[in-house]
Image (tube, helix red, strand yellow):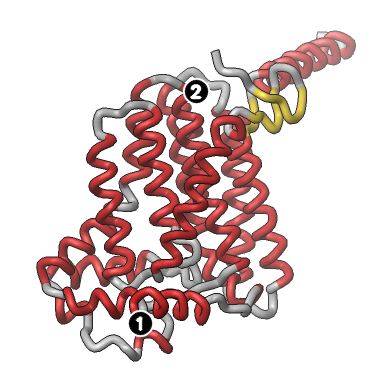
Amino acid sequence: MTVAGSESAAQTSGGKRFGTISARLRQTSFTLLDAVQLFFLSALSVLQIGLWHRVPQSHALLFLYIGCFILLAGTALTARASSRPGIRLFDDLIVPIVVLLVVFETLGYSIPAVNTTWLEPTLIRLDSWLFGMSGSEYLERYYNWVLLDLMHLFYVSFYFVPLSLLVVMYRRGKRAEFQHSLGAIGLTFYACFALYYVFPVLGPYRDPDVYIHFTRDIVTSGGALTRILRGFLDHAEIVAYDCFPSGHVAATLVTIFLAYRYRLAIRGYYVFIGVMILLSTVYLRYHYVTDLLAGALVAVFIYWLSPNACRVLIYCGETQRWLRYQKES
């Protein structure tokens, strides 16, 4: 083969690769939830650089956030145009959830280094105005091992409530409805994450000024489930300062709203479980009553915003345009 022929073949091969990349980009779109997650990861990465000498974990967190950024962006670019169900599931559901969990589990390392203006005394006063003491102290009189075991079950069930709705919506096969549900739940969590930096609150269980007023120990007052689940939560929920607003309330209410919007057969079960989750957050000393009200406000706001917000494509590959409003068929 001549030199000219080699160059021609190389150009042809390069043209094909460029054409493949261009075709894939035309099939790729970045949603508002993608943008929110990428923004959070970028902001947290910059924050770790700023806290490099103040937070010992910043070195590891920086690489973790950069890794999640690459995973999220890379999956959107390479898997979003795929027609294979497994790859689409990975892009649509698994990666966003993994990134969200990483962000949630690491927030507590940097929040106290960013903001030390505590809202806690105000929340304690509001609870005292309602009950004469904190809501958790008031409910202590109703402690018994049966209720403590049940309430821990309901509290832990929160982790499966939003996830179960997303699985149901995904299996229904109506992509617009699934994307709306995923966007609404995702935006709810990230709204709470942002507010944790503005209003850092430990909660009754972690605040020593409140904890000293409790007269009964939850673990010794409960049964076997209390001991197992309390130990699990103490290790799993390593984030501190994550009480205001209550993410449990916000995400649970948005899940209920979506279940009724799309007339899911299990919506009645969500209502029952949701009420028990709300009660368990105060009964088990994780939240002040005001946290629940703030979480409800976040849920109402995000649910009102989400039908339009979740249709915004930050980048639309098909038209090579930024900030396009996607109309549903």
Q: Which residue is mark 1?
A: 133
Q: Is residue 185 left or right of residue 52?
A: left
Residue 156 point in image, percent of width and height: 28, 57
Which mark sits nearer the N-terminus, 2 or 1?
1
The disc labelled 1 sits on which kind of residue? Met
The disc labelled 2 sits on which kind of residue? Ala
Q: Quadrant of residue 161?
A: top left
Q: Nearer the viewer, residue 180 or 224?
A: 180
Name the residue: 50% across, 71% down.
241
Name the residue: 80% across, 9% down.
1
Q: Is residue 4 left or right of residue 78?
A: right
As helix, strand or loop, the secondary structure at mark 2 comes to helix
Q: Which residue is mark 2?
A: 176
**For the view shown, which residue lies furthest in the right direction?**
4
Instruction: In the rendered view, tell whether residue 259 sits above or below residue 235.
Output: above
The C terminus: image quadrant: top right
Name the residue: 17% across, 74% down.
142
Q: Nearer the viewer, residue 26 or 267?
A: 267
Number of numbered discs present?
2
Q: Alpha carbon of mark 2 to alpha carbon of mark 1: how far?
A: 46 Å
Instruction: In the rendered view, tell whether residue 284 sits above or below residue 172.
Output: below
Q: Nearer the viewer, residue 76 or 222?
A: 222
Residue 226 point in image, percent of width and height: 18, 69
Q: Nearer the viewer, residue 105 or 267?
A: 267
